[in-house]
Image (cartoon, coloured by chain):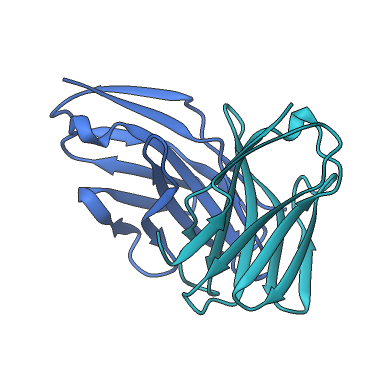
Amino acid sequence: AQSVAQPEDQVNVAEGNPLTVKCTYSVSGNPYLFWYVQYPNRGLQFLLKYITGDNLVKGSYGFEAEFNKSQTSFHLKKPSALVSDSALYFCAVRDSDRDDKIIFGKGTRLHILP
Amino acid sequence: DADVTQTPRNRITKTGKRIMLECSQTKGHDRMYWYRQDPGLGLRLIYYSFDVKDINKGEISDGYSVSRQAQAKFSLSLESAIPNQTALYFCATSDRRRPMFFGPGTRLTVL
């Protein structure tokens, strides 16, 4: 069965600095990978996805993520953090070979300090 | 996202009551999901459905049941609610390769 690990419950970054939110995954086949963001009292919003192709994926609000098959990782990155990026971030994975359900990580709370 | 609607948005109920949460979508997606969110536990999958005749258990299906009344409608029932089912419940939809779209959530409190 597939699984997702987000090893950090919380990440603190100063405004203007680069940020990274970590995600590792486990699937038996080829992964489809996703990042979602949740702002307070809101539902989840899609940020970006990796299906196939280029390992560096660009998404909404200046975010990007790098797929690393050997390390089974899909870390979320942004070159320069904004205070408005403060939110809860979820990584998710689906085993594309099994055309199976989508499993989410526990989430990482990102705090951008002004 | 108005494409996926959930009713009710908030509900307070008592232990032992039957509760139904409803979800409808206008995105034309064939796949629908129910997740619950708890602080520190993230999103956990309750049930999912890939089409009207397909229902599958997720990670935490005990105490829940679902009905896929049509392609656009997927309801979640708690036959006899208990306090540890207090959570934020999300419905979501997707196609095979597209990302999921989430509803606004239903905050359920079981006293």
Which of the image's four quarters has the N terminus of chain B? Answer: bottom left
Q: Residue furthest left?
A: A16
Task: Say which quadrant the C terminus of chain B sits in.
Answer: top right
The image quadrant that residue A84 belongs to is top left
B7 left or right of A58?
right
The answer to whether one can see residue B90 in this image is yes
Q: Residue at x 41, y 61 (%)?
A: A50
Left or right relative to A96: residue B77: right
- On the image, the x and y values in percent for residue B94 come to 53, 69
Q: Nearer the viewer, residue A85 or A66?
A: A85
Q: Quadrant of residue B65?
A: bottom right
x, y percent for residue B74: 67, 66
| Residue drawn where x is 54% and y is 47% of the image | B9
Chain A tint in image: blue
Q: Residue at x 42, y 69 (%)?
A: A52
Tell me if residue B20 comes above or below residue B14 in the rendering. below
The spot of residue A37 in percent (x, y) is 39, 44
Number of callouts in the render? 0
Residue A8 sits above or below residue A6 on the image: above
Instruction: Pick the residue in front: B21 or B58.
Output: B21
A31, above or below B35, in the image = below
Depth check, front residue: A75 or B36: B36
A76 on left or right of B20? left
Chain letter of the cyan region: B
Say whether residue B100 is visible: no
Q: Where in the figure is residue A17, as x and y percent of width and height?
A: 17, 28
